[in-house]
Image (tube, coloured by chain):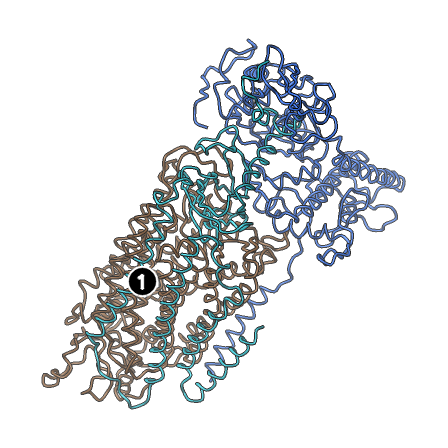
Chain colours: A cyan, B blue, C brown
Amino acid sequence: MSPWLIILSLGSAAVLLAGALTKKFWPAFFGLSAVATVGISVLAPSYRWWLPGGAQSPMGTEIDDLFYMILIITTVTYIAVHVVLITALIKFSGKPGVKASFSHGSHALEVVWTIVPAAILLFISLYQIDVWMRFRNFATFNRHSRENPVAEVTARQFEWRIRYPAPGKKLMQKPQPDDLYTVNDLHVPFGEPVVIQLRSEDVLHSFFLPHLRIKQDAVPGAIIPVQFQANFEGEQELVCAELCGWGHYKMRGQLTAQRKSEFDKYLRDLQARQSDDGVSGGRAAAVVTQATPKAENHP
Amino acid sequence: MNRSRQFFGTVAVLVGVALCGGCAKSPEPKFVLAKSTEEIVPVRIGDEKTAVNPVEAALHENFGTPNSLVAWELFPLDYGKAEDDLDHPERGTEGWKLLHGRNLYMQHCVHCHGTSGDGAGPTAKFLNPRPRDYRLGKFKFKSTAGAIRPSREDLRTTLEHGIPGTSMPSFVLLKDDLEPIIEYVRFLSMRGEYEFRLYKGIQGILGRKVLAKGGSVPAEAPEEARAEFNDGWKDTLEQVSTDLAEAWTTADAPESIINPREATILDDAKVLADPKPRGSVKFSGETLPADRRVKLDHKEGQYWAVKSLKDEELGFVHHESLEARTGIDPKTGKPTEKSLKRGRELYYSQAVACFKCHGYGGRGDGPSTEDFWEVGNDSPLFQYAGQKYEVRGLHDDWDNHLEPRNLIRGVYRGGRRPIDLYRKVFAGINGAKMPGFSTSLTNDSDLWDLVNFVTTLPYDQSILQGPLPDPSVQPPAAPVNPQASN
Amino acid sequence: MSTHAPADTAHAHDDHDSHGHAAHDSHGHGHELSFFQKYVFSTDHKVIGIQFLITTLLMLMVGGALALGVRWQLAYRFSTMPIVGQLVFANEGGQISPEFYTMLFTMHATVMIFLVIIPILAGAFGNFLIPLMIGADDMAFPTLNMLSYWFMWPAIFFFGLSFFVEGGASSGGWTNYPPLSAIRAAAPGSQDGQTLWLIGVTFIGVSSMMGSVNYMTTIINMRAPGMTLFRMPMTIWAMFITAILQAFALPVLTAAGFMILADRTIGTCFFIPGGLTVNNTPTTVGGGQALLWQHLFWFYSHPAVYIMLLPAMGMVSDMLSCFSRKPLFGYKPMVYSIAAIAGLGFIVWGHHMFISGMNPALGMTFMISTMMIALPSAVKTFNWLGTMWGGNIQFTTPMINSIAFVSMFVVGGLSGIFMAAVPVDIYIHDTYFIVAHFHYVLFGATLFGCFGAIHYWFPKMWGRMMNETAGKIHFVISFIAFNFTFFPMHFLGAAGMPRRLADPYNYPYLEHLLPLNQFMTWSAIVMGFAQFILLANFFLSIKYGKRVGRNPWNANGLEWTAPSPPGHGNFDILPVVYRGPYEYATPNLDVDYFPQTQYVPVEQRVNVAHGH
């Protein structure tokens, strides 16, 4: 229990008591609720009731910035509205024999409070468009990563099935005999934009990387390319964010971002493991082909 | 004032009623008894005054309840000895691993596999295929031969990879928590098998009739009959537990694992692939000095030219020795034409007869899926052994309807590595109707040809076409179209 | 209550029409009605309204119980759940199964939306208030009105039944996105439970449609003399526009419902793409489009969000004006705002689908239209503040609930801006941030508005007051518990906790949210039990409440000139309307209210007519 919480609750009790004694209980009550709302929001990050750390992708950082921009605008609005509300409640709480002012409104005020919010809202929406287009518009993706998707991620009840192309090959839409398969553990090289092809085998799922602020529904019948760039080396959560059935909560995955060289090694190890036939510790030919000499060495 | 009192009085009563409803004693999870066990009428064991269900009593004594587990030292079970581990203080108690396993099981597994591992959790009846019932001690996907129990490593593989094409998801991210879960699954499996074996034991002593409700009650039987039962029961208990302990010990023995029969010969390709060979290596039966790295050079008639990297010497290896083993062309990494052809031949042969279940087009719709099959001796419905199921098609040992795998889809439940498929072809699938061919196909290359054929099918269905090898094997009148969508 | 002289006159006037002989008074409806005709299959709009009200209040408790089940699982995942766990899941030690959790939240939303919020607004208050407030003696189509109520019961029956069929109740979330809801094998609840859900919703749809046709006709045709459109109270405007919204949006949902029903039963594939393998059943064939449902569903359900809000806005406007004893600030801008919300409400549905993979250009246009719909909401908020400013505020139970409405609506409205902004929505979509947002709007705003409205119009329904102390205690507990329950959901959302997870702590990055969730659960439990105060207050006041006259609040609306409770045919004499409903605090009257029906001699009119 933080001292702030104790101060907050004691303060609340005091305010309510004072309100009740001065016959201003309801203004005190609503005022307190507004103050408490702002107060707890200020405290929240210290309990980690907040964004799970700073965004770990460039796009995530931009999204965070936009989030904070809206947060500032809305907080100011919230406080302003409540200051007016509470002031009205205090100032105009009912007194016997007093008559309210007789007014049906003000044209000027209506115009002001229509145009100002309209301008702010329009600004917010126009300001967001750029990031949105870069997130979703395929044409804006990095050309190299767009043409060389790292993997195909197929969501199914209740796991992420991942298909990589064999090292040195391109990901084909149809499965290839030498494709590499894993489940729930998506490896990507870090520090560069990567594209995955998102599919679903059964129902709707959603590919959610909370720490990268990336989310995209996996829609059955569609292949959706998703671009992201991991700015970290290590592991982060991969979450399913769209209800996909009884085991929705089981659909936990992991994104592992590695150096390019480690990623390549990971794929090679995967290939060796997957071609294990118990005879040669890796399907003989797959490895041997690399050692095949040129024809001029003929004796 | 009176009015207010009425309001608040009523509210208090309503709230009170609701709270009482909510705070009733919380139920404990319990191990459900098998139907057959429930049939047994109580008997007096030894000098006990009251009659009990002997199987239930033995289960309770040796395995406890989910909230108070009993770990029986007799069984090869790593229930977790108390450790002095400062990093993991929860390991300080005796049996921590089993308890931890139970907690994880109750969180991750119980919905499908049920509290007692009977594959009948609340979600189970909706799943396709049904979740595994551990109580028979049978597991389909494992590396051990025949009816041998799965090794811990096998259970781990299943947990890590999930079972594609079923509702078993991957739990790979549980990492360190997998070990306790594996132990608990083994515990449940042992408990279940113990229960069924005891039933059969008691059946052996008393005969089926006495067991059924309404038969003569041994509790009221004359002294000598009781003494006879008690002796037999004691032997049964001892016999069953020893058998089980042995069975589960065997599971983890290295020799229980199926390896390709020629794997003991050091494989030439392995030498070729090894970038840093240490000491002397054997190559094609010849011992080479360690610094002599070798690689394949080119094919020459029946032979591969092998070149030593050290002094550029050329040697020759018999062509067949590399290819014949796994039917893989070392140059392309793909199965050879010959291997696929042979695989197809076996697929459609009367001796191996894959087509009977997996179908003429490999879609798992062979003629045997149209037959009525009999209840087996080992199924939970063993009381009805010999009678036919009401539903057409194959049934597994858990009495679930069973569909032969559609080989076109490229979904391999037991793993997609060549070795996994080899093991299936070698030993069959325990509990399912898939037989093993280790005795009928004594040559490993035949098994590999089948594996190659099966692994190629999803990508190239043209290999199904051609004249059928055995004239007695004829596809149904309706043509099978291998190009149809899968 | 304020002590204004005419209140006494109202009392005196009132003595001879207590509710005993209300059902057959002097309007020529002389024939006796049987008990069934009078109270069960009644065609009287007031009885139907009260039937709706009581039904929805009971359903509120059902929906609340389901919500507590959800909350319990989130606080004590997979541990013994009281009652349900003990009864149904005894073998597992009382822990519910994950699919039961999905049914809990699906049916919670279904009950709350289709059986509580929509019927309490349109069904209960719409029915009760429309004829009274526009000066009509009943609805235009009384039988249709009766049917509209009784069509709700098959829905309740089917929703209830669905818990007991194989597989259990619908479990695809109230949005029921296919293929999860279209393919039987996809989830336990997608078996017969889903079919029953669709049938139930269809019944609700028919019920709403009958109501909506009725309201439109009544409001257009049956207004009392002098009740011009711009003299109608905000409640009636809101009901009117809501009815229009319903009439245009509902057919789409009903059609979509039949399409998905066809997908499920007769093998069509509107929503099922080919090549899916669901629960390892044979691969689906067909070329349906899963997103089509989302478009159709939200084409109804986004306007439905306003169906669930606008009437409450109207009622709150009336209450705020009455208890500020001051004319409503900006009557016409308020009306235009409602109309604007309704109009824009039809072109914003795509904001539910920002991350569904639809064309990015659509995302942009929907973002702009969604941002713009915040504008009329903001205008309304400012006008409510303007109404209170300079008033003589009386903190009655209806008033404090209305103030709560404004305050909570601001929170819900502002949090909406986050998700209207597409890039931010990428992150917060399908997280608890959304859950916080719509609970602030639907509970914080709408339900508190309804609580206020129940207290406000109760005297008109029964001729008795509800207990003020109990009302205030109920409000204080509900308000605090409500904020404790739902405000932290913003934080959960910000921390990236997705909705609809039976066990969020399966994800290590959410583990630290467990204590917060437990706190929220206990707040929710307190909030749930606090509603017993409302129920007790409501039902006991019917019998024991303080008797009052026609106009206990000294309000202006036409309904307050009718007897309490109004008899069959509502008014003693046909009311004639002389002005708008918000003429409080007129400077040249002794009292601070000025009923719409009160005739003012010509020489006095000059001073007051510049209003409406």
**Does B9 appear above or below B74?**
below
Q: Secondary structure at mark 1?
A: helix
| Residue nearest the observer in this picture, A260 or C143 | A260
For residue C241, side relative to residue A8 (left or right): left
Check the image and name the residue furthest to the bottom: A97
Q: Amino acid at mark 1?
A: Ala
Residue A215 percent across, percent down from the top left: 43, 50
Residue C173 percent across, percent down from the top left: 44, 51
**For the residue carrying disc 1, how many other residues have a C-alpha within 10 Å: few (<14), some (14-19), or many (20+)?**
many
| Residue nearest the observer in this picture, B362 or B151 | B151
For residue C61, side relative to residue B296 (left or right): left
Check the image and name the residue furthest to the left: C602
Residue C452 percent across, percent down from the top left: 36, 73
| Residue nearest the observer in this picture, B344 or B84 | B84
**Does C491 appear above or below B247?**
below
Is any part of residue A136 visible from this angle?
A: yes
**Does C96 appear above or below C58?**
above
Kindly indicate the quadrant of the structure image that contains residue A68: bottom left
| Residue nearest the observer in this picture, C577 or A221 | A221
For residue C115, side relative to residue B299 (left or right): left
Check the image and name the residue furthest to the front: B311
Kindly indicate the quadrant of the structure image that contains residue C50: bottom left
For residue A284, side relative to residue C179 (left or right): right
Q: The residue marked by circle 1 belongs to what chain?
A: C
**Does A6 appear above or below B167?**
below
Residue C144 percent across, percent down from the top left: 27, 57
Q: Pointer 1: what residue? A: C122
